[in-house]
Amino acid sequence: MKIGIYGGTFNPPHLGHITAARTVFELLKLDQLLLIPAGMPPHKDLPAGSPTPDQRLEMTRLAGEQIGLGDRVQVLDMELRREGRSFTSDTLRQLREEHPDDELWLLMGTDMFLTLQHWHEPEKILSLAGIAAFGRTEADTEELFSVQRDYLYRTYPQAQIFTMTIPGVMDISSTELREQLAQKGGSKWLAPAVYGYILREHLYQTHVDLRHLPLSQLRPVALSYLKYKRIPHVLGTEQEAIRLAERYGADVQKARVAALLHDCTKKLNMEEQLALCKRYGIELDELEKEALKLLHAKTGAAIARDVFGVDEEIYQAIWWHTTGHAGMTALEKVMYLADYIEPSRDFPGVEELRHVCYEDLDKGLLMGLEMTIQEMTAMGNPVHRATIEARDALKG
Ligand SMILES: Nc1ncnc2c1ncn2[C@@H]1O[C@H](COP(=O)(O)OP(=O)(O)OP(=O)(O)O)[C@@H](O)[C@H]1O
Ligand SMILES: O=C(O)c1ccc[n+]([C@@H]2O[C@H](COP(=O)([O-])O)[C@@H](O)[C@H]2O)c1
């Protein structure tokens, strides 16, 4: 197996890192890519007030997902957990032990490549891994690489070096980006979910008020709560909620906010869900205590209200978005159905359901509720009483 190792301070990880990682993965035909945030970078001090190790780890995770290679990209916390300076030679020793038969390639940009001989134990590094170096700007061309490459080959005859230019390279550094973020800029250099995480954790002097976010900031913040694969669903739900709200005279702005936040606790496990229920005093019936899917609607509503200050109508729309209930408001119906029929949904009958939803909101709602009841019954799962009551109320 061919494994790429991409270390960085990732303070924060930006699109330059993501673009480079994706390109090197393809050019070197790697099977796996390990992103390794440095605990204590050997050659520079972290600026005062930098994010915690856990925050840099989470940002790197969110950025790693954006590379779009699924499980083939992993983020390791081995340097964050190690005491002292994060020497690359130590990291490579450990990885070599864990992967005795694999090919290891250390990825780095121009700045790192040009100083490699000054790193701790350079000969060790060059004996444990090949070097895959890439330009950080359009100006970093082969001429710049070749002098250093020749020098390294002469000095460390066992070295294996691969240099390359990255098409569409992004000329940005974390240092510049931190400055831009402090001046309310910088989002264009970041994966939306990473930008959202920075805003919600108030990193890099961004200081936004989470209770009064414009949609342009609420959207990335909402995405930062999600697993990567759920992002298209939430963005699709927002689009569908706009259309349904416009069609049926519900408040479009509220529908968008509800849609963006409706799955904000979806990735939490049962233990985390139950902890939130306890914290927010959410009482659960017997069915809910067992069903993770039912809990996220309630905890999501609680977070939306507590953290983002949504009003009662939005809170209720999120709260009921999974089960529905008898006597739903227009906004609740819009939220329920937008979640059900948004463009990325693909299940037997969805086209017909979409059609009915735009013909008559209540007919669509009844059809959606009945489909859910049928599906749950077919799978042998109990149906929440709120769903039955919602269906019965509509049937009259
Ligand atoms: N825009 C970029 N394009 C390609 N590679 C980059 C880019 N920025 C950084 N790198 C490379 O990514 C690795 C990790 O970089 P690091 O996390 O220190 O980011 P940085 O932007 O260089 O940060 P800082 O400004 O704090 O030095 C290094 O090998 C670096 O050369
Ligand atoms: O081991 C060393 O001596 C050494 C010296 C300079 C840089 N590095 C590593 O190179 C990677 C990129 O560094 P940076 O500053 O660009 O984030 C990161 O993983 C650092 O730990 C490592």
Image (cartoon, rainbow, N blue to C red):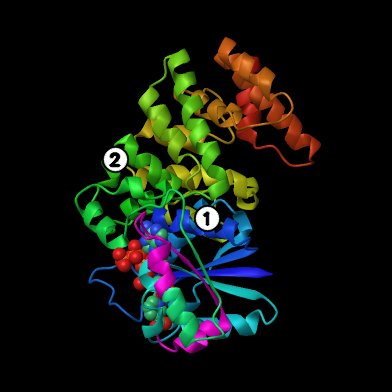
Numbered disc 2: secondary structure? loop
Number of residue marks: 2
Numbered disc 1: secondary structure? helix
Separation of disc 2 and disc 1 at Cα? 35 Å
Along the line of sight, the residue nearer the viewer: 66 or 275: 66
Q: Is residue 204 magenta-colored?
A: no
Asked if residue 203 shows in the view, the reply is yes
> Mark 2 or mark 1, which has the lower sequence index?
1
Q: Residue at x 35, y 49 (%)?
A: 189
What amino acid type should be assigned to the residue bearing mark 2?
Leu
Res. 213 mark: 2
x, y (%) of residue 348? Answer: 74, 27
Farthest residue in the top direction?
Answer: 359
Along the line of sight, the residue nearer the viewer: 118 or 319: 118
x, y (%) of residue 383? Answer: 69, 37
Res. 23 mark: 1
Along the line of sight, the residue nearer the viewer: 106 or 392: 106
Give the vertical position of 58 relative to 190 (above or below).
Answer: below
Say whether residue 138 is left or right of residue 91. Answer: left
Residue range highlighted in magenta: 119-147
Quadrant for the C terminus, please: top right
What amino acid type should be assigned to the residue bearing mark 1?
Thr
